[in-house]
Image (spheres, grey):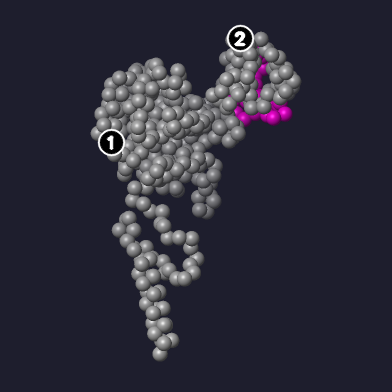
């Protein structure tokens, strides 16, 4: 009799556990898992909060865009299914041109993003709306060049960093607009700011309106995303994270993660306590059957590029390898005129130059050589005398010849 009673209690206990684990989640549907004394699961704190969502950010497509890169990004975003896609500008090659040229370039771009199965938010870059002519065309086609939107419990500020056109700044009208937006949305859990130029790099934003926008944001949590420079960089200002994205098809030497040069999009998961970020390199996304995705996106012609020749060298300062320094060759004569080639010095002092693509060397001609080498990453004081830090002041010169080149650079205090 006692055994039957114990068995009945056990059955009731299991039933209660089952009922407890079959609950309504945030979407209003049932989740179910049978809880027992021992369970093949870590916990049942489902990652399905109603305020959480996921979106992607694409970076510069232009500035010498390469064929079938942005088009591939579109197809791969459709595989990953974010809730929407945000940009940081430079979507067409643009510049100053006739309206029919603008129309043709925008038609090509729209043909790409219209294949997305989720919304795409345009952000103006200098290639898109950086001069009066392109800004006027943008206005006629897309309307606002600065705006905002709210999704779930996050506020998005889309900033025009070419205001007025022809500058790199945020104008007073724009600042007044965002001031009102922030006042009208005091309870947003997080604010996302998207713009094209990293305006904080110029005099810390004191002269271009960026510091004024930071004052408006003070006291609320926010994250900033930009592009423009075609390499990845994270900066922390006022305790907040600022991200400069690399490229999504834009001109790049593509030297990889060590150089912060790659094609990617940022994957953002918004949670209550802020965004969780992941850089997803385009080459890492494949279809379920591993079949190549076929796209038809043209690229900028490379026919006018100068022939390059291999350049490898070694750089030392007072006999010690200049590990981590960026060495830059600025062309003066011959095919080198107007050309810039650079490389990062390895721990043993060795480096390889790149001009158009990874480690392709440099065109033949005369070059002035300068270095960027700082005590603490990209922000600390220079470790070098001023005569080595700019091409115009540098006394270091070398000639690149056809064929392979070996260069030794020995700098002194």
What residue is rendered at 45% in x and 19% in y? Answer: 202
Q: Earlier in the sequence, mark 2 or mark 1?
A: 1
Rendered residue at 40%/18% (across/down)? 206
Secondary structure, magenta segment, majority class: loop
Q: Nearer the viewer, residue 17 or 368?
A: 17
Q: Residues within 10 Å of mark 2 (few under 14, many from 20)?
A: few
Q: Nearer the viewer, residue 152 or 305?
A: 152
Foreground of the two, 108 or 328: 328
Q: Position of residue 40 (x, y in %)?
A: 50, 66
Please identify the quadrant where the C terminus is shown. top right
Q: Which of the numbered marks, if any, corresponds to residue 155?
A: none
Which residue corresponds to the image point at 43% horizontal and 86% vertical from the top-left?
A: 3
Horizontal side of residue 149 vs 292, given as left or right: left
| Left or right of 310 on screen, residue 166 | left
Disc 1: which residue: 186
Residue 140, by quadrant, is top left
Q: Which residues are magenta?
A: 346-367
Residue 128 spot, x, y in % from top left: 39, 25
In the image, farthest residue toward the front: 2
SS assignment at label 2:
loop
Instruction: Nearest to the eye among marks 2 and 1: give it.
Output: 1
Reply yes or no: does residue 100 show up in magenta.
no
Vertical position of residue 305 compared to residue 268: above or below:
above
Mark 2 — residue? 393
Do we see residue 307 in this rendering? no
* Whole-percent x, y for residue 33 in the image: 41, 66
- Horizontal side, residue 378 vs residue 29: left or right: right
> Where 367 falls versus 89 (above or below)?
above
Q: Residues within 10 Å of mark 1 (few under 14, many from 20)?
A: few
């Amino acid at each position: 009799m006692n055994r039957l009673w114990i068995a009945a209690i056990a059955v009731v206990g299991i039933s209660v556990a089952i009922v407890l684990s079959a609950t309504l989640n945030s979407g209003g549907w049932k989740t179910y898992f049978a809880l027992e004394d021992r369970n093949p699961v870590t916990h049942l704190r489902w990652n399905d909060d109603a305020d959480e969502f996921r979106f992607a950010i694409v970076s510069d497509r232009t500035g010498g865009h390469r064929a079938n890169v942005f088009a591939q990004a579109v197809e791969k975003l459709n595989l990953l299914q974010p809730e929407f896609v945000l940009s940081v500008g430079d979507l067409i090659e643009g510049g100053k041109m006739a309206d029919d040229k603008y129309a043709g370039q925008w038609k090509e771009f729209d043909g790409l993003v219209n294949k997305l199965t989720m919304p795409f938010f345009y952000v103006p870059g200098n290639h898109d709306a950086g001069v009066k002519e392109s800004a006027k065309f943008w206005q006629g086609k897309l309307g606002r060049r600065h705006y905002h939107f709210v999704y779930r419990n996050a506020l998005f500020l889309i900033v025009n960093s070419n205001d007025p056109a022809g500058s790199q700044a945020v104008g007073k009208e724009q600042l007044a607009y965002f001031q009102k937006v922030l006042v009208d949305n005091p309870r947003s859990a997080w604010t996302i700011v998207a713009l094209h130029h990293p305006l904080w790099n110029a005099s810390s934003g004191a002269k271009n309106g960026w510091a004024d926008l930071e004052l408006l944001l003070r006291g609320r949590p926010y994250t900033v995303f930009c592009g423009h420079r075609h390499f990845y960089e994270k900066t922390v200002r006022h305790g907040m994270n600022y991200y400069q994205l690399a490229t999504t098809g834009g001109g790049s030497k593509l030297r990889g993660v060590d150089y912060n040069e790659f094609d990617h999009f940022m994957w953002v998961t918004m949670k209550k306590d802020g965004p969780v970020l992941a850089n997803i390199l385009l080459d890492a996304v494949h279809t379920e059957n591993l079949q190549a995705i076929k796209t038809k996106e043209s690229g900028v012609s490379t026919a006018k590029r100068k022939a390059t020749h291999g350049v490898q060298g070694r750089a030392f300062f007072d006999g010690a390898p200049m590990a981590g320094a960026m060495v830059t060759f600025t062309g003066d004569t011959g095919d080198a005129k107007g050309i810039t080639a650079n490389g990062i010095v390895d721990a043993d002092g060795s480096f390889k130059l790149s001009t158009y693509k990874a480690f392709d060397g440099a065109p033949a001609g005369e070059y002035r050589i300068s270095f960027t080498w700082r005590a603490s990453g990209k922000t600390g004081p220079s470790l070098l005398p001023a005569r080595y830090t700019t091409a115009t002041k540098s006394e270091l010169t070398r000639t690149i010849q056809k064929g392979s080149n070996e260069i030794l650079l020995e700098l002194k205090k």
